[in-house]
Image: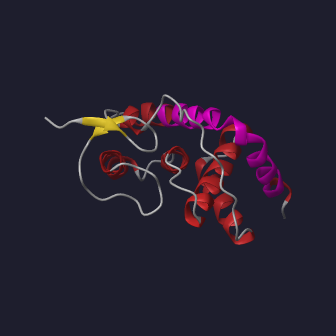
Amino acid sequence: MSTLSPCVGCRALVADTEGPTHPYLGASPGCWGIYGEVSSRWASHSAWPLAVDAYAVQHPGVPERRSSQSVWVHLVSLCLIVEYGWTPAMGITAKQHLLARQRTWDWLEPPSDQGAVTILDLVAVTDAGVFATEVRRWAEAVWAAWSAHQPAAGVRAQALLRAP
């Protein structure tokens, strides 16, 4: 039986193991492994891009260019999906447009509480409808946790909405 410890990003209790992690997302090896397991089951589901947004924002990493860029583009995608009703597929397009227009990204200080919903809430899900509902619940929890940065993300989202 392995020891559990809080993930460095989302604070979920995950196996305290050695192993691979993402190069700039701040996830513990145990959490990154769970993300991989969930991804292998659900990557073709239409809600998966929203799960990617929630995971990326909930695991912001440390202040550096790639981490800052990741948080910004995924946070703006969350804004467009949660606040404006965009689909997860439309969020992918939004991220592409953001990356094409912006080269530098300020660091957004993460909230001390990343929200109560994490990748762990998806581990046991086997039904596609339940998966979509749980991913949406996760995304909304992460969006709410980042409330201090919602106005800034909203400005970027509005710019995309006005763009040709």
Query: Magenta stretch containing residue 138, yes or no?
Result: yes
Residue 159 found in image quarter? bottom right
Location of residue 68 with respect to 80 vertically, above or below:
below
> Residue 42 versus residue 35: which sits nearer the camera?
35
Q: Position of residue 79 (x, y in %)?
A: 69, 43
Q: Which residues are magenta?
A: 134-160
Q: Is residue 71 left or right of residue 161?
A: left
Q: Residue at x 74, y 48 (%)?
A: 153
Q: How many marks?
A: 0
Q: Residue at x 70, y 68 (%)?
A: 104
Quarter of the rendering occupied by the C terminus: bottom right
Which secondary structure dominates the residues rendered in magenta?
A: helix
Q: Position of residue 23 (x, y in %)?
A: 43, 63
Q: Position of residue 42 (x, y in %)?
A: 38, 47
> Residue 49 versus residue 1: which sits nearer the camera?
1
Location of residue 136 with respect to 45 vertically, above or below:
above
Query: Magenta stretch containing residue 25, yes or no?
Result: no
- Which residue is at the far top? 116
Residue 151 found in image quarter? top right
Q: Residue at x 52, y 43 (%)?
A: 58
Q: Position of residue 133 (x, y in %)?
A: 50, 31
> Residue 15 versus residue 132: which sits nearer the camera?
15
Q: Residue at x 47, y 61 (%)?
A: 24
Residue 66 found in image quarter? bottom right
How has the structure been colored for display? Answer: secondary structure
Quarter of the rendering occupied by the N terminus: top left
Q: Is residue 65 left or right of residue 8?
A: right
- Which residue is at the far left? 1
